[in-house]
Image: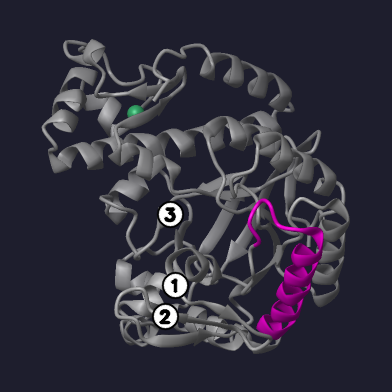
Amino acid sequence: MNIISSQDGYARQIAFSTKNGSVEGPIFMPVGTQASVKSLGPDDLHQCKAQIVLANTYHLFIRPGHQLVKQAGGLHSFMNWPKPILTDSGGFQVFSLSKLRKISEEGISFRNHLNGDPLMLTPELCMNIQDSLDSDIHMQLDECTPYLCSQEETKKSMEQSLRWGQRCKNARKNPQNKLFGIIQGGFFEQLRRHSLEGLIEIGFDGYAIGGLSVGEPKEEMFRILEFLKDKLPSDKPRYLMGVGTPDDLVKAVALGIDMFDCVMPTRNARNGCLFTSKGKIIIKNQKYFDDFEPLDSNCQCYTCQNFSRAYLRHLYVSKEILSTRLNSIHNIYFYLKLMSGIRKAITENKFEKFSKNFLEEYYSIDDDNIE
Ligand SMILES: [Zn+2]
């Protein structure tokens, strides 16, 4: 099925349907770790024009448990979000949060990071949890290798992820829910190729690129994207996991990426770091004490339409909880507006110009960029 509506160079405007509505890409997915995009309700997300959100399988499995979410009628009904949801596999959180994890052919043994209970995440359980959550897009269980991992270790791990990918495909319960495979292989091009070919053979509804943004220099990430750009199937969505800054998004779209997620806009919002069309603003800086201009005069979000930098600075330094919400609304809106601008530029065959203008403008103030 053709999902590409327009193409400009390698940049693609795509649309694909899920059982809870269609997704237009390139798109950014706000991260709702615990079935909540921190401090934002569904009304805020609708206002920010979010099309799809991400929720974390590991966290929901640990608490409140996928059976409870199933009992609530699934994640859409539990969190009152009617549009598409993507759930990750939980693998990444098992690696980053739990101690005493051990990998075997069967799966990952680990201890619950809240109470220490021994647990095992297998590809079959991973599919079972995501089926109970009833997300529109499931991710396969994979193993993510760190940046400086030997070729031999990376190969072993990538092959493990491929076998788990096949088991996830076999264990998927509802074919209406999409299942994405995850390309691993670290920073070794031949391993990336092998991983991609293996996944294509199994056959997935979309292909994600994992194992990037793990502490490597940016050029290394873009080298892998450059390598993959003409090898990824053109008729399936391509998702770059865990990336990134606004400028990363623009550059990755130029290499054919359709979907992104990252905690950056919401996490930075809570730390008072706000993205604007002219670069990052650190709102606590003294120079905003009596600055009654909006955060970003080019932004139509609720925060920019109603409040000044001086007020946002005041809320932040006074540690008012409204600070988190207003800052998060702006950062999420900014990311989603950027993506809709990208889609429009691709349709009009002006993506290269859009990208050049955006990056020039985005790098134009740099005094706040020193954190
Ligand atoms: Zn704004």
> Callout 1: helix, strand or loop?
loop
Seen from the viewer's position, the closer of residues 346 and 208 is: 208
Q: Main secondary structure of the magenta part?
A: helix
- Distance, label 1 to label 3, CA atoms, is 24 Å
Residue 60: give x, y in percent of width and height: 38, 74
* Quadrant placement of the N terminus: bottom right
Residues rendered magenta in the picture: 145-169
Residue that numbered label 2 is attached to: 111
User: Residue 99 got which mark?
Assistant: 1
Tell me, yes or no, whether the two marked residues, 2 and 1, touch with CB atoms within 8 Å: yes
Nearer mark to the viewer, of 1 and 3: 1
The reply, left or right, for residue 152 in relation to residue 353 is right
Neighbour class for label 3 at 10 Å: few (<14), some, many (≥20)?
many
Disc nearer the start of the sequence (3/2): 3
Residue 48 seen in render: no
User: Residue 5 got which mark?
Assistant: none
Residue 166: give x, y in percent of width and height: 74, 81
Residue type, numbered disc 1: Lys
Residue 65: give x, y in percent of width and height: 35, 82
Disc nearer the start of the sequence (2/1): 1
Up-down: is 286 above or below 138?
above
- Distance, label 3 to label 2, CA atoms, is 24 Å
Up-down: is 4 above or below 125?
above
- Distance, label 2 to label 1, CA atoms, is 6 Å
Q: Say which residue appears at 37% left-offset and 38% top-offset.
A: 268
Tell me, yes or no, whether the two marked residues, 3 and 2, touch with CB atoms within 8 Å: no
Q: Say which residue appears at 43% left-offset and 54% top-offset.
A: 31
Q: Quadrant of residue 239?
A: bottom right
The reply, left or right, for residue 54 in relation to residue 283 is right
User: Residue 31 got which mark?
Assistant: 3
Q: Quadrant of ligand 1?
A: top left
